[in-house]
């Protein structure tokens, strides 16, 4: 018969009970600590979200983009929370189908004839080889007329030759826009001689891989005083690329009354910016229509146009920019910029710290850039931004300590923000309406008749002209000449619907076409 030592057993049980009790307290304290940390983190995240100047769906998108870029392994987890929040955003979409070959408004107009009153010497070409030969053998004052037809250039680069003169520029043209189509690839036409002009031509990128269709024109070095007017540029990453070469800069170019667009999102990691300028001074970009410049790969950030690289005194005026028109995308597209995505100082003209100085952005309508600002000033010194309308964008950013700006008489939704040391020297007579926090709704619908469809007729009496105040003489979006102060992009109480193609009898509702 076995005997059990009850006192020893009771002691062991007491020790077990004591240990269990300590474990219970340990787990209780650990649990409380975890919950406190969890709820503290939730509180801080909520506070951070609420205090952000961005609407909730835009904040969610920006955060998710940052996670995918910097913390891809965690981004898989955050996507389940942030992507549903992104869907809260109220969708604003341009209502019409844009056919650039039928467009009658700001930009290039098919069928428009450029009248050449005086010919010095003229060469008519009808073949691709004839066009190349004419470009490389031109002398000052040469006129090169392209007869109706398709000109397919299989070379990745065509260098022009022969300098034009201020009194006798070299002019390449077709009599009527729509007659001559030039298909290009690679670097396109390299302009490194001064005083060349290109009118009434349709340039089309023709590449299986988007990375192979970089430019229609590369203006470099001595290629100053170049002019592009009433042309169509289709399916390029950077249709017009401008930069210095070996310390020589192509200054004083003009890009006027052209249309730039892509038929699909660009499947490339290369920069996507229809007008991409570095180094060159005193360029004018006016009365152009730039739309659908979506970048689908790489950082997925694109710009309608920018000046950067230590350049000076550039002007963006009376342009129509639609980041998303026929195309719809979650990629980030920014309307106009001085500074773009930045560039190393060692690449800047004369070693300037700034990206651009003395720039002017005036009388433009920038719309449907919903994922970021419509105007981005990156190290842009002494900039004047006045009389622009920014619809369905996140506003205007002035960024970095080199950047200073005066913002006058603009109408926009979203915000005007100083970032990373950027300084707004003057912020006067701007109408800035905040987008709703939950849905990022577009408040400018309350001011204009039908802005989503391009009708910026004023609903209420926000418009004014101040006869006692003057500004630098300019031409507004509608073509009115003025030196008076006014709110928005146009002087008159009546909006110029013809500039937005709204008087075109061939105008078609996109939604009706999509749902046939």
Image: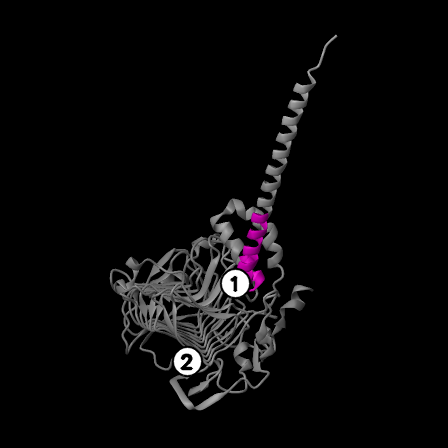
Which residue is located at x 39 percent, y 85 percent? Answer: 471
Look at the image and tell me whether residue 205 can be seen. Answer: no
In magenta stretch: residue 40: yes
Q: How many marks?
A: 2
- Could you say which is closer to the camera, residue 398 or residue 138? 398
> What x and y, as percent, mark residue 342?
37, 60
Residue that carries the numbered disc 1 in the rendered image: 52
Please, is residue 84 above or below residue 160 in the view?
Answer: above
- Could you say which is closer to the camera, residue 150 or residue 273? 273
Q: Secondary structure at mark 2?
A: loop
Task: Report the span colored magenta.
Answer: 36-61
- Could you say which is closer to the camera, residue 166 or residue 325? 325
> What x and y, as percent, mark residue 221?
28, 64
| Residue density around tag 2, few if under 14, some if 14–19, many if 20 or more, within 10 Å | few
Residue that carries the numbered disc 2 in the rendered image: 115
Q: Tell which tag, 1 or 2, sits nearer the viewer.
A: 1
In the image, taking residue 225 as reference, residue 37 lies left or right, namely: right
Q: What is the quadrant of the N terminus in the image?
A: top right
**Residue projecting furthest to the bottom:** 468
> What x and y, as percent, mark residue 34?
58, 44
First in sequence: mark 1 vs mark 2 = 1
- Could you say which is closer to the camera, residue 412 or residue 77? 77
Look at the image and tell me whether residue 92 can be seen. Answer: yes
Q: Examine the image and state in which quarter residue 115 appears.
A: bottom left
> What x and y, as percent, mark residue 93?
60, 68
In magenta stretch: residue 502: no
Please, is residue 462 above or below residue 87 in the view?
Answer: below
**Residue projecting furthest to the top:** 1
The reply to whether dot 1 and dot 2 touch (C-beta < 8 Å) is no
Q: What is the quadrant of the C terminus in the image?
A: bottom right
Q: Which mark is residue 506?
A: none
């Amino acid at each position: 018969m076995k005997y059990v030592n009850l006192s020893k057993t009771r002691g062991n049980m007491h020790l077990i009970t004591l240990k269990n009790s300590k474990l219970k307290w340990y787990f209780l304290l650990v649990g409380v600590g975890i919950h406190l940390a969890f709820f503290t983190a939730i509180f801080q995240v909520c506070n951070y979200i609420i205090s952000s100047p961005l609407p909730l769906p835009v904040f969610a998108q920006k955060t998710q983009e940052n996670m995918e870029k910097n913390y891809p392994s965690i981004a898989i987890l955050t996507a389940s929370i942030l992507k549903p929040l992104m869907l809260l955003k109220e969708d604003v979409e341009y209502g019409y189908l844009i056919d650039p070959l039928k467009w009658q408004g700001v930009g290039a107009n098919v069928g428009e004839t450029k009248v050449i009153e005086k010919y010095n010497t003229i060469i008519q070409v009808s073949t691709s080889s004839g066009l190349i030969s004419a470009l490389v053998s031109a002398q000052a004052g040469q006129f090169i007329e392209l007869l109706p037809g398709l000109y397919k250039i299989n070379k990745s680069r065509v260098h022009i030759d022969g300098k034009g003169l201020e009194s006798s520029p070299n002019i390449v043209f077709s009599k009527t826009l729509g007659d001559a189509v030039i298909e290009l690839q690679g670097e396109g036409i390299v302009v490194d001689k001064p005083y060349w002009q290109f009118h009434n031509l349709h340039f089309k990128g023709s590449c299986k891989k988007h990375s192979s269709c970089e430019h229609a024109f590369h203006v470099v070095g001595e290629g100053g005083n170049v002019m592009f007017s009433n042309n169509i540029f289709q399916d390029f990453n950077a249709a017009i690329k401008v930069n210095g070469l070996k310390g020589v800069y192509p200054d004083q170019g003009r890009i006027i009354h052209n249309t730039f667009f892509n038929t699909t999102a660009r499947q490339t990691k290369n920069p996507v910016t229809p007008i991409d300028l570095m180094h060159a001074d005193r360029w004018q970009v006016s009365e152009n229509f730039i739309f659908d410049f979506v970048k689908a790969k790489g950082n997925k950030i694109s710009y309608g146009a920018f000046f950067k690289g230590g350049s000076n005194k550039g002007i963006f005026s009376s342009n129509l920019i639609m980041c998303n028109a026929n195309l719809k995308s979650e990629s980030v597209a920014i309307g106009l910029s001085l500074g773009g995505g930045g560039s190393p100082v060692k690449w800047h003209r004369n070693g300037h710290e700034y990206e651009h100085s003395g720039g002017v952005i005036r009388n433009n309508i920038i719309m449907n850039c919903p994922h970021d600002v419509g105007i981005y000033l990156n190290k842009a010194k002494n900039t004047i931004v006045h009389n622009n309308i920014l619809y369905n964008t996140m506003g205007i950013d002035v960024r970095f300590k080199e950047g200073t700006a005066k913002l006058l008489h603009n109408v926009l939704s979203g915000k005007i923000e100083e970032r990373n040391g950027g300084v707004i020297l003057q912020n006067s007579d701007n109408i800035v309406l905040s987008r709703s926090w939950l849905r990022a709704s577009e408040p400018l619908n309350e001011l204009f008749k039908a802005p989503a469809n391009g009708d910026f007729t004023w609903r209420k009496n926000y418009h004014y002209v101040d006869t006692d105040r003057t500004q630098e003489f300019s031409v507004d979006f509608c073509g009115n000449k003025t030196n008076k102060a006014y709110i928005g992009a146009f002087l008159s109480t009546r909006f110029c619907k013809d500039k937005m193609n709204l008087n075109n009898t061939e105008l078609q509702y996109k939604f009706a076409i999509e749902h046939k």
